[in-house]
Image (cartoon, rainbow, N blue to C red):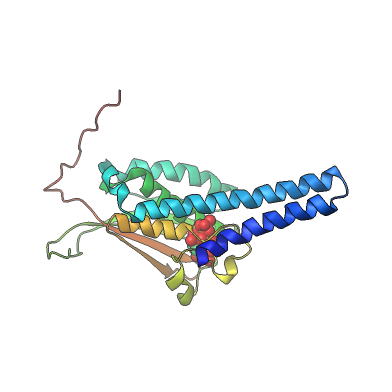
């Protein structure tokens, strides 16, 4: 299957490099270069394994026990701070449209990871001088499955980069999927799979849409009921 194949490729490559170097390296420099390349390939294997394990753990639902009520805005601002610097390095403008507070029920670290993956993609697939926008809004028109009216969070990351075809968008969150135009950028095609797993854990949806030029990735997640959950739950003091 795809997983075994994707792990086998870098492992085989590392093995070939080492074997080749052992047989044919003419000097220490050549040997050292081959070993460094092999180490790089094996690091890649490790990160693929870690991502797959994380996805499996999330899909098992085990992380739901770590759900808490928290204000999403400072959590998003922490992620933005990090990616603002990365965007700047790439010559990109990073704009944020966020409300002052947004009570959210979920796994804080996981959700930050999901947003980080979206921003990482937006930066990676944008040529310089574009704008990346992160916005969060509350929708109150959606109906829940039980018929009651509920609020939903809509979080969008918009870029002006290379974008995706409709056909590729439909496959974007498949494990290991990478569009043809993405082949010369680093990555293993697991970022959106992880986002998809995290969003599903929060009973939400992930959608992709065109931004001509660029891509819009949108997460929608049901928000806790103001009537049933206190808006500002005091956080337990850490010892
Ligand atoms: N903002 C975007 N603009 C254009 N294409 C995108 C964007 N985000 C994702 N894609 C496409 O979807 C594919 C899958 O994205 P995903 O994040 O899962 O993988 P990746 O970024 O290639 O690798 P990884 O996230 O594992 O480092 C990408 O390879 C790319 O083809
Ligand atoms: Mg990615």
Expressed as whole percent of the image width and height from the top left, the position of residue 211 reads 45, 68
- One can see residue 90 in this view: no
Q: Is residue 13 left or right of residue 179?
A: right
Q: Is residue 234 above or below residue 62?
A: above
- One can see residue 43 in this view: yes
Q: Is residue 53 left or right of residue 161?
A: left
Q: Is residue 66 above or below residue 156?
A: above
Expressed as whole percent of the image width and height from the top left, the position of residue 6 reads 56, 62
Picture quadrant of residue 218: bottom left
Q: Nearer the viewer, residue 119 or 44?
A: 44
Q: Going by the picture, which residue comes out furthest to the right? A: 26
Q: Nearer the viewer, residue 65 or 199?
A: 65
Q: Nearer the viewer, residue 158 or 54?
A: 54
Q: Going by the picture, which residue comes out furthest to the top? A: 239
Expressed as whole percent of the image width and height from the top left, the position of residue 223 reads 23, 53
Residue occupying the point 27% across, 58% down: 203
Q: Nearer the viewer, residue 206 or 140?
A: 206
Quarter of the image where the C terminus is located: top left
Expressed as whole percent of the image width and height from the top left, the position of residue 80 reads 44, 45
């Amino acid at each position: 299957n795809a997983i075994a194949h994707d792990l086998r490729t870098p492992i085989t490559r590392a093995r070939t490099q080492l074997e080749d170097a052992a047989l044919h390296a003419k000097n220490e420099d050549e040997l050292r270069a081959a070993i460094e390349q092999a180490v790089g390939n094996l690091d890649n294997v490790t990160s693929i394994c870690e991502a797959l394990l994380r996805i499996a753990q999330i899909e098992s639902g085990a992380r739901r026990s770590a759900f808490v009520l928290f204000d999403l805005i400072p959590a998003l601002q922490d992620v933005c701070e990090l990616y603002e610097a990365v965007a700047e390095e790439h010559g990109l403008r990073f704009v944020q449209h966020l409300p002052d507070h947004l009570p959210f029920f979920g796994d804080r670290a996981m959700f930050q990871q999901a947003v980080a993956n979206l921003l990482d993609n937006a930066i990676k697939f944008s040529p310089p001088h574009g704008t990346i926008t992160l916005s969060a809004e509350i929708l109150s028109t959606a109906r829940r499955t039980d018929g009651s009216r509920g609020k939903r969070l809509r979080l969008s990351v918009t870029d002006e980069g290379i974008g995706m075809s409709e056909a590729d968008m439909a496959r974007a969150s498949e494990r290991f999927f990478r569009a043809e135009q993405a082949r010369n950028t680093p990555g293993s095609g697991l970022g959106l799979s992880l986002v998809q797993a995290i969003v599903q854990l929060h009973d939400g949806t992930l959608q992709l849409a065109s931004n001509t030029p660029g891509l819009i990735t949108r997460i929608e997640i049901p928000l806790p009921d103001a009537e049933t959950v206190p808006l500002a739950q005091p956080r337990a003091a850490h010892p």
